[in-house]
């Protein structure tokens, strides 16, 4: 990877550690680095020295500033947090920010959220649809017409349509295929629904506001969490719930079972996620809000 460190460009192996970077730039007096936006300060300590650059969130093209001994050695205050952010303490990097990562609102938001969480790339969303379609076709007994609400073959073709919304069936299938538990945080009721939590140590978190999915990440790029890191997991879960509560208070969620949802494109109104989804699929409209009456 290529990094811009202060005023020079450094090329370093993708598997390099933080200590390798410090040695490469010849900065034995370095006490911390800063990178990302908002700027994250990572102190150079025994545990962080051995961390790989990719694991602390550095990628090619990143700008890095070196904090040297005798310089900016006092930890700055954290930037003002948004409703979609919370402070956590990670034993590997110190203080960090847990935040909502928003994905495009284009009828594929569920697949985008899972794709970003697992691959850091939403371009694999179509591939995830194909995985679901194949699994449904190959397991007709498990995914029968009654479960799917339509003929197996029809459903398998329907989910490949980019205008089709995914839900619990798709989440369960992708969780198994990707070997990761998926925690769905329902913003309206402030509660997790955990898919395959008993099968995997790794988990990701996606938020559902009634009509849209987003995902959770730590600001240095961490999106897959491990249950056996109990201290960090506890912080991630409790702070995710706090974030969801703040988002709901500021109108981020829609109760599609009770409240009317309005299409901001054509002004039609609906009650129920199913009707909203059908409208989105038939028209391509993706801009919805909560109707005042």
Image (spheres, grey):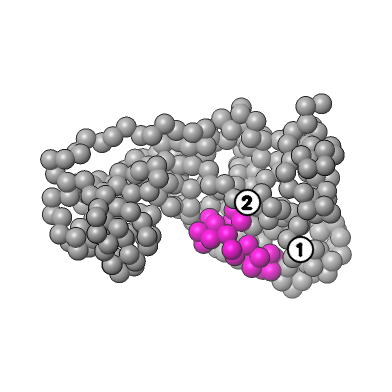
Q: In which image quadrant can residue 9 be found?
A: bottom left
Please name whichever residue, 149 or 7, is drawn nearer the observer in this view of the structure.
7
Q: Is residue 78 above or below residue 67?
A: above
To which residue does mark 1 refer? Answer: 161
Image side of residue 148 versus residue 239, left or right: right
Mark 2 and mark 1 in contact? Answer it, CB < 8 Å. Answer: no
List the residue tagged with mark 2. Answer: 104
Which residue corresponds to the image point at 77% horizontal and 71% vertical from the top-left?
137
At label 1, counting other C-alpha atoms closer than 10 Å, the crowd grade (few under 14, some 14-19, many 20 or more) is: some
Q: Earlier in the sequence, mark 2 or mark 1?
A: 2
Give the overall secondary structure of the magenta segment.
helix
Q: Quadrant of residue 269?
A: top right
Looking at the picture, does residue 141 appear above or below residue 66? below
- Magenta part of the chain: 112-132
The residue closer to the viewer here, 47 or 176, is 47
* Residue 50 visible in the displayed image: no
Please state the horizontal and vertical placement of residue 34, each as a whole percent of the image: 29, 47
Residue sitting at 73 percent across and 48 percent down? 286
Q: Note whether residue 263 is visible.
A: yes
Q: Is residue 117 magenta?
A: yes
* Res 150 → quadrant: bottom right
Quarter of the rendering occupied by the C terminus: top right
In the rendered image, residue 138 lying in the magenta stretch gets the answer no
Task: Name the disc covering residue 133, or none.
Answer: none
């Amino acid at each position: 990877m290529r990094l811009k460190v202060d005023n020079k460009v450094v090329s370093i192996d993708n598997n390099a550690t933080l200590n390798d970077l410090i040695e490469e730039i010849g900065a034995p007096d370095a006490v911390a680095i800063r990178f990302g936006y908002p700027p994250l300060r990572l102190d150079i300590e025994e545990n962080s020295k051995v961390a790989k650059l990719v694991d602390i969130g550095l990628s090619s093209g990143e700008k890095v500033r070196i904090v040297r001994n005798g310089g900016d050695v006092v930890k700055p205050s954290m930037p003002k947090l948004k409703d979609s952010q919370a402070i956590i303490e990670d034993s590997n990097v110190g203080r960090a920010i847990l935040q909502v990562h928003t994905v495009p609102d284009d009828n594929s938001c569920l697949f985008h959220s899972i794709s970003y969480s697992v691959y850091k790339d939403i371009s694999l969303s179509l591939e995830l649809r194909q995985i679901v379609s194949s699994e449904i076709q190959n397991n007709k007994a498990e995914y029968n017409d009654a479960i799917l609400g339509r003929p197996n073959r029809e459903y398998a073709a329907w989910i490949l349509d980019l205008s089709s919304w995914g839900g619990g069936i798709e989440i369960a299938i992708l969780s198994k295929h990707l070997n990761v538990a998926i925690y769905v945080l329902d913003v309206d009721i402030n509660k997790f629904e955990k898919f395959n939590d008993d099968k995997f140590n790794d988990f990701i978190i996606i938020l559902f506001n009634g009509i849209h999915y987003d995902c959770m990440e730590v600001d240095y790029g961490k999106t897959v969490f491990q249950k056996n890191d109990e201290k960090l997991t506890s912080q991630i879960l409790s702070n995710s719930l706090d974030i969801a509560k703040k988002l709901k208070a500021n109108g981020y969620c829609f109760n599609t079972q009770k409240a009317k949802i309005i299409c901001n494109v054509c002004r039609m109104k609906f009650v129920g996620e199913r009707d909203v989804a059908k409208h989105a699929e038939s028209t391509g409209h993706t801009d919805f809000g909560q109707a005042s009456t």
